[in-house]
Amino acid sequence: MRLSDDEKAMRDGAHGAAKARAMDLLVRYGEALGAERLVETNNVAGAFNASTPSIAHLAEEGFDKVYSELNLDSDETVEIPHMAVPTCQLITGIDNRNWQTQGVDEKLAELQRRSEQYLGARGVNMMATCTPYQVGNVPVKGEHCAWMESSAVIYCNSVLGARTNVEGKESTGAAALTGRIPYWGYHLPENRFATHLVDIDIDIDEMADWGVLGYFIGFAVGEDIPALNGIRRQPNLVKLKHFGAAAASSGGVEMYHIPGVTPEAASMEQAFGPNRDKQVIRFGAKERRETYERLQCATERKVDFIMLGCPHNSIEQMALIAQLLEGRRIHPDVALWVHTPHAIRQMAERSGYNAIIEAAGGVVMSDTCPAISRKLPPGVRVVATDSAKQAHYLPAIAKVEGWFGSLADCVETAVSGEWQGAG
Amino acid sequence: MADDAKAPVRKVTLTGRKVVGGKAAAEALVTRDTISGWGGINERDGSVIERGHELNGISFAGKVLVFPGAKGSSGWSAYFHMTRLNGVAPAAMIFTRMTTKIALGAVVTRVPAITECDPDPFAVIETGDWVEVDAESGTVVVTKRQGGT
């Protein structure tokens, strides 16, 4: 791999041992990919926090040890300096406020707090969300990023037109200290054109429709790049957040185009660019019904847990949940957890939404989600969620049955204790 | 290809591109299903835990893992990294589809890894075959299991 003089100096230790270890990892990784060079990045989103039992063991040797081993793949424990470029923490395992409700061990909650102080002192911004683009990290078109979190990557590439591959814990750790990432995959303009045309002949409008469409497309295109034809209503952040998370769960979709909506495709022709060999997929009423059924993996209609906010809720989703729950009480046998970034939780607090949700018997959670933390209320057997992504992962991870439906279906289920959606 | 009873030891050589250097020799574990890291494997014993996966419940620890590649969460590398720390990593990896997840995962698992193999590894290698991987030179020597096809 070709390195610049600055990159060689970092590799050779001119800027300290940590940057040398970081550059060593990036070179090994870049060569494994077959990348020709690195590219500069000023925007890193990774997973640095110490919040799991396996990390607690390493943390006994100090947080430099945790970063060296898990974020740099370095046997040698190196002193970690300040991050070289703006860097944020993605979703983490523990809600700093609600760890007791989660059922987290007190020592682990304390470890995460100390870990955050260590990371904060080195310039890691504690966004603690899977949706950094909702709380201030909004890359501009063309910006090279190094992001983890599949639902954030697909949003970054498609909706924002910034450029990132799905990075990992070690590559983001190294990128944060060097401002470099392999120039490969979605960093190259020629790899960003559509490969599949999805012809949609039904109206896609509600958030649940967007989730179902995304879940269908992930299965249909795998890791390729779909372009959507037949979207007649303007989507917004919430709908595309759900669509992308679903497509990245059933498949490995990291980029899509909606001509006239997403920034790299003013037209269908532009979406496909030089790609001539387009495959065509149809999405109609039959495909919607089949995919909706595929998302249901429950038979028991008595529900004991409602999970809302995957990816983390926007402020308007918080407002809607409050509106639906105003003056009502959820069923005594049901737990309702609503997940939103802590910055949005603060806005929701000030707007009075949290008070309404809590008065109804719900909990407003931040920083984590049940799939990441693997913490659910005790004894849960049947879950309902408005997220296709959570409906995909939670039954496998937590060995529970899962229902998928609209936000309104989930709220009505929370109140009645019985699944109120279709299916 | 018919087995000759008088020549039970049959060897096939594949050539490919080095992803991570090094040499290893072990039994093959072959799957046509891509593997998830986070949510797809148990990093304490190296077993696949995904429901419906061809290898569900089977451990790749100490095996030459032959598979299409990675899928799922960006935690892929972190989970394979932990299989190394826990001593249950595969002995080597042979895969067919390059992605950032598999590249980074192979690098931090620090086992010999090869891709772009010719002939197609799925046409040649079966579970139980003895496989010698020399990633530096990009060669894989497969000794077919006795009684195999």
Image (cartoon, rainbow, N blue to C red):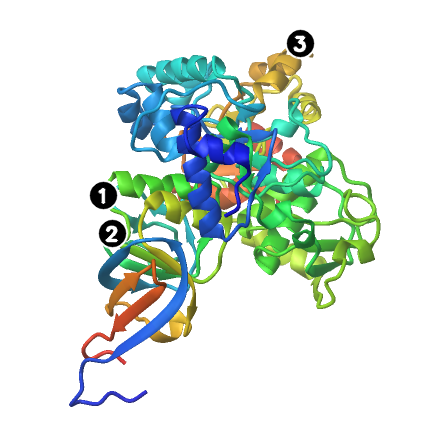
The residue singled out by tag 2 in the image is B61
Residue nearest the viewer, comparing A339 with A241: A241
The residue singled out by tag 3 in the image is A350
Kind of residue at disc 1? Gly
Kind of residue at disc 3? Arg
Residue located 66% across and 9% down the image: A350
Residue located 36% across and 56% down the image: B113
Residue A89 appears at what percent x and percent y? Answer: 51, 25
Q: Report how far apart the C-alphas of labels 1 and 3 lie in the structure.
A: 50 Å
Q: Is residue B70 visible?
A: yes
Name the chain letter of the residue that bears numbered label 1. B
Q: Please state if A171 lies on the left or on the right of B6 as rendered.
A: right
Q: How many residues crowd around disc 2 within 10 Å: few (fewer than 14), some, or many (20 or more)?
A: many
Q: How many residues crowd around disc 1 within 10 Å: few (fewer than 14), some, or many (20 or more)?
A: some
Q: Please state if A108 lies on the left or on the right of A88 as rendered.
A: left
Kind of residue at disc 2? Ala
Mark 2 vs 1, N-terminal side: 2
Residue located 38% across and 69% down the image: B15
Q: Is residue A370 visible?
A: no
Q: Report how far apart the C-alphas of labels 3 and 2 lie in the structure.
A: 52 Å
Placement of A278 over or under A270, stated as above or below: below
> Residue B87's mark?
1
Name the chain letter of the residue that bears numbered label 3. A
Residue located 38% across and 46% down the image: B107
